[in-house]
Amino acid sequence: MDFEVTWSPEATEDLELIAEYIARDSEFYARAVVTEILSVSRNICEFPLIGRVVPEIGDENIRERFIYSYRLVYRIEPERILVVAVIHGKRLLENLSERFEDST
């Protein structure tokens, strides 16, 4: 069964900030990165368990996919997949823990 993929407002903002940051040097690469992140997010619905369990959290329902140097973090819910964050791979998730509790 395919899930619906939705984005939290915070994850949408993450993606916009990433695009702005990369665009300072290259509009082309900003578009390429955003396009690839969106493509991976669309494909999660087919195989949601393909992403690895986020090590900092250890919850089977919170997983991530890597796109270039970014982590697309999502939560598998009964009716949908919620993209919770898009962060740089070197950034720790400890400051984002409230996103996993409050996301609806």
Image (tube, rainbow, N blue to C red):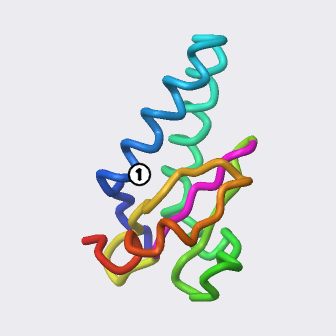
* Picture residue at 29% right of the left edge, 75% below the top: 102
> Left or right of 77: which side holds 29?
right
- How far from the left and from the top, in percent, is residue 53? 66, 79
Residue stretch rendered in magenta on the structure? 69-75
What secondary structure is the stretch in magenta mostly built from?
strand
Residue lying at the far left in this picture: please name it: 104
From this view, report whether residue 73 is shown above or below residue 9: below
Is residue 96 covered in magenta?
A: no
- How far from the left and from the top, in percent, is residue 56? 66, 79
Q: Residues within 10 Å of mark 1 (few under 14, many from 20)?
A: many
* Picture residue at 48% right of the left edge, 63% below the top: 45
Displayed quadrant of residue 101: bottom left
Query: Observer-nearest residue: 84 or 99?
Result: 99
Residue receiving disc 1: 11
Q: Amino acid at mark 1?
A: Ala
Residue lying at the far front in this picture: please name it: 95
Displayed quadrant of residue 33: top right
- How far from the left and from the top, in percent, is residue 34? 54, 32
Q: Quadrant of the C terminus?
A: bottom left
> Left or right of 63: which side holds 99?
left
Q: Secondary structure at mark 1?
A: helix
Residue lying at the far bottom in this picture: please name it: 59
Q: Quadrant of the N terminus?
A: bottom left
* Picture residue at 67% right of the left edge, 70% below the top: 50
- How far from the left and from the top, in percent, is residue 22? 61, 23
From this view, report whether residue 58 is shown above or below residue 90: below
